Amino acid sequence: MSDHEHKAKEYQAKGVVPFWPEHFLKELGVGLVAVAVLFVFSLFVHPILGHVADPADWAYQPAPDWYFYWVQNFFDVGGHYWSILHLVKFDWVLMFGAPILGVSALYMVPFIDRYPERRLLKRPLMLGMLMFGMLFFGYFTTNGVYAHNRLIIREPYSIFATSCATCHSIKGLGGNNRGVMKTPTGQWTYPPSLSHVGSILSPAQIRSQLENPQDGMPQLNLPPAAIKDLVPFLAHLK
Amino acid sequence: MYTRIVRWIDERLMVSPLWRDMADHPVPAHVNPSERVSAFVYCFGGVTFLLIIAQFVTGMFLTMYYVPDIINSYNSTKYLMHHVLFGQQLLSMHNWGSSLIIIMVTLHMLRIYWMGAYKKPRELNWIVGVTLLLIVLGFGFTGYLLPWDEKAYFATQVGVSFTKYVPFIGPALLKVVSGGSKIGAATLTRFFAIHVLFLPALLIVLLGLHFLMIRRQGISGPY
């Protein structure tokens, strides 16, 4: 009996397998499934490269990567209540203390749960912590996505209110006489109502008017994110 | 011939005993998915490791085209996406791979937590594991800035602004992290260096420790 066969018998008796090649190949097999999923997914779904970074773009609403939504939303919601409670002076407690507490709790897990019992259902404290954590991440992620979507939907309205409504009106709202101008030929021109702009101008025409205004409209130097939001918004006014 | 070459090399390197030690070490059957299908939960860590290797490989190829400065980072990314053979796929794999790693790390951690596998004598490995989680999140955060589009810029601005709340050293730390008073050219090169040099170095060392401890303490048994 060779050395190899000897070892194989011994391992079989103990109910174990050698790391190489049995265990390694099986682990690799499972891993390759994940890599294959990643590969195929990447063939069909591509990340989008936005407009080049422009620090002066006041209209852009940043979104974190999906796994950081909960961070942003936790601090947004927390900061809101913090200011209601007049604790702004102590905002480091929320913004620094809370994350430190969270990370420490994660590090301390083996020292909080020191007993040999391993069944989760018999570890009520740890089960509670797990439930709390999952509800925490779940709630703030969902809420963060919801809050971001609401912000995106409101964005064209708020850009219109700050940048357009001084001169233009939509269905009687906004606009005043500040935009009225006398042309060199003595005629008065009025900023048109935008209530039906979508049926008069195409999206491309709206875009070009916003980027290079014609017919007496001043150059507003709208940032790319504002134009991106305004074009579909105005094109839908039919 | 082959055997002779291997023997010649091994006489000089003497890695054979190390290799035998690693190759022959017994792995319990309860973690083997071919023994019991439910044992695939033990593979989440290994899958994460394989995905990390994939990130290393795709990242190396991306670095061939990527130029870390504020004029060219956006343009080189765009060039890579539209004009380089397989560039789009490479970038996609690196991008989605990061998300998949986060998912796998979370599953791995849930498995450890669920089974109480961090209990004595494996406390130290849990600590290394949590540190690895923070490093992985650091990879995600620093990598997000590199394409230098608006999403990257403003998300980083929000993320970096958290450092100013650290007591006493906050404002100084903010300056160190962003390399100046605002997000700009210095931030980009800094984040690039952190993403491709500092964090990988840390990751390799801590992964080594992580695996060493698994070897020393063994895989935790069934209940």
Image (tube, coloured by chain):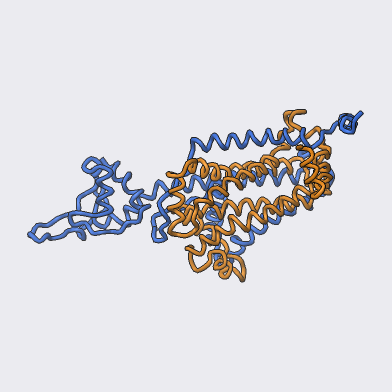
Chain colours: A blue, B orange
Q: Quadrant of the N terminus of chain B?
A: top right
Who is closer to the viewer here, A138 or B106?
Answer: B106
Does residue A227 appear to the left or right of B154 in the view shown? Answer: left
Residue B110: name its quadrant. Answer: top right
From the top left corner, tell me how far across and down residue A8 is, in percent: 86, 31
Determine the residue located farthest toward the front in the rendered image. Answer: B1
Does residue B107 appear to the left or right of A198 in the view shown? Answer: right
From the top left corner, tell me how far across and down residue B58 is, in percent: 57, 45
| Residue A61 visible | no
From the top left corner, tell me how far across and down residue A162 is, in percent: 32, 57
Identity of the residue drawn at 24% across and 53% down: A168
Who is closer to the viewer here, A9 or A2?
Answer: A2
Residue A94: name its quadrant. Answer: bottom right
Does residue B153 appear to the left or right of A117 in the view shown? Answer: left
Asked if B104 appears above or below B36 in the picture, the reply is: below
Identity of the residue drawn at 33% across and 51% down: A227
| Residue A154 visible | yes
Asked if A176 appears above or below A40 in the picture, the reply is: below
Who is closer to the viewer here, B182 or A47?
Answer: A47
Q: Quadrant of the C terminus of chain B?
A: top right
From the top left corner, tell me how far across and down residue A3 is, in percent: 89, 33
Asked if A1 appears above or below A208 in the picture, the reply is: above
Identity of the residue drawn at 66% across and 46% down: A132
Please count the marks in the image.
0
Determine the residue located farthest toward the left in the rendered image. Answer: A185
Does residue A203 appear to the left or right of B69 in the view shown? Answer: left
Identity of the residue drawn at 78% across and 43% down: B117
Who is closer to the viewer here, A3 or B76?
Answer: A3
